[in-house]
Image: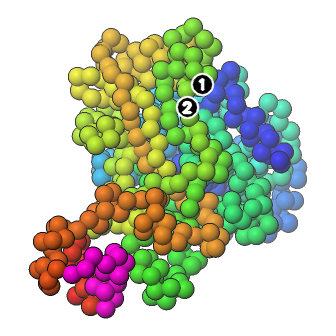
Amino acid sequence: MSTIRKRLITNSIQVGGSLVCLIWLLSFSLGCAGGDGGSGSGASEGRVEEADRVSAHDDLLYADYPGNCLSCHAAKAQEMLQTTHYQWVGQAPDMVNGASILQGKLTNAVNSYCINIEGNWQMCGTCHIGRGQRPDDAGSDLENIDCLMCHNSDYAVQRIRLDSGTMGIADPDDSLVRNIHAPNRANCLACHAKAGGGDGVKRGDLSLATIDNADRHFDVHMNIDRSDLNCQACHVFEDHKVIGKGSDLRPTDDPDRGSEVSCLTCHSDKNSPNGHDTDKINDHVARVACQSCHIPEFAKTATETYRDWRAHHDGSPADGSATPGHPYSEKIANLIPVYAFWNRTSDNALLGDDASRTYDARTDTWPTSRPVGDVTAGKLYPFKYKTAMQPKTRADHRLIPLDTYEYLSVTGNVATAIEKGLTTIGYQADTVYDWVITDTYQLLNHGIEPASNALSCNDCHGGSRMDLQVDFGYQLKADPATLCVQCHGREDDDPFGEIHDEHVNDRNYDCSRCHLFSRPERRLR
């Protein structure tokens, strides 16, 4: 295990005596001084050759940080100030809920991990790109931007909240401001791998192992023996704004470019009629996302699948009688994804929402993030599915942002944490509440395996991975005895595959003849 990974794991365990809830947005780059992973703006400011850049930093002192960065790169810092990475809120055009308002974890986001950051900037803010202040603090300015989080991996993996309340490392030295480099995976994963409270907890397809992974089966793109891509190879930055985000993340950092990172940027031929070796696969590319076949399993480092705030991580009741700590959770490795059609918009919960609007009676869950789409709209994507036991007001169905600082660092008493959370959002501390199961779907993008490991036809058609008729809308639109005789007399019950091929391949019949959807891109009749 590399030194960087050891430091990251150590720093994910405890800050200020408690487990850190690290929740952040996207693969991270600051891009000062241009170069690989730079701002991509084409501006001349700060763009110098690598050798000149190194010599320009040779005499810098950490004691002058960040002023010494700003003396040359103030324009770059000004760009960073406007990004979602810094503001933690932004435009949310991909959200069907509240698309016209600014959304993000700083203010109104609700999830099935730490619920919301209200009342706990001290801990949740440890993964912010700032140097300690909230981005909306009156005194927060360019000097609050922590350039080294992206441009020095040694700094990134050691950074903690200091006793002064600022972010930094315990024993800094001048090498930190002299050894400046373009962002690498260690910089990005210092936060993104530990989102939710520890290594691999939240995303399910990112972990600290991705930093120095040498196994292409673990990740074909991010491994030191093969492609060895940095995050910016896909998450392209322009003026410090980035493309790419999960389905459960609200802001779109650069609305002009959108939020999608497309596999076709590199694999452009795979979307063509002859892009794959077999016609059967080519028939699927318009409706099945690349990730669905090329991520057969996820959570190669165990990921959280359930969280319960009523007990601590060791199973002891969260009643204040034990030492404060992380809530009870269940983590599992090597999971099969859950699949859903997604049209690239999502219905994500916001603080203060009436949660009954999205209550799912079929699963008895209260969703915090659901992909929007069905068999008629969108592609089939793989997701991590996660549930949590959370408090909700009984009378008007508001999910309560319990005070995680109280829970994780002070008393460990969930009742007190809920009371404080209620008052934070304007309710009386004695408001009656219930415990309910929330759930969230999180898009899987990383952990792509070699093509030889891709799913085969039988994995989805006839296998246990998914039920196309029950869960995805592929059922017949009428009973076969009624449906079939509309075109011909009663025939032998041949295997489904033979019947399907005869109608689609031989007779060129469109899906709508037997189902409740059509596939116009296949030019059937």
As displayed, is residue 441 above or below residue 286? Answer: above
Residue at the disc numbered 2: 329
- Are the residues tagged 2 and 1 within 8 Å (C-beta)? yes
* Residue 47 point in image, percent of width and height: 71, 67
Query: Which residue is located at x 83 percent, y 36 percent?
Result: 172
Q: Is residue 486 visible?
A: yes
Residue at the disc numbered 1: 313
Query: Which residue is located at x 80 percent, y 46 percent?
Result: 4
Toward the viewer: 419 or 332?
A: 332
Instruction: Give how far apart the Cα atoms at labels 2 and 1 are.
Output: 6 Å
Toward the viewer: 515 or 342?
A: 515
Please state the extent of the stretch shown in magenta in the rendering: 491-506
> What element does badge 2 sit on?
strand
Q: Which mark is residue 396?
A: none
Label 1 Cα crowd, 10 Å radius (few <14 / some 14-19 / many 20+): some
The amino acid marked with disc number 2 is Ser
As displayed, is residue 34 above or below residue 82? Answer: below
Mark with earlier residue (2, 1) = 1
> What element does badge 1 sit on?
loop
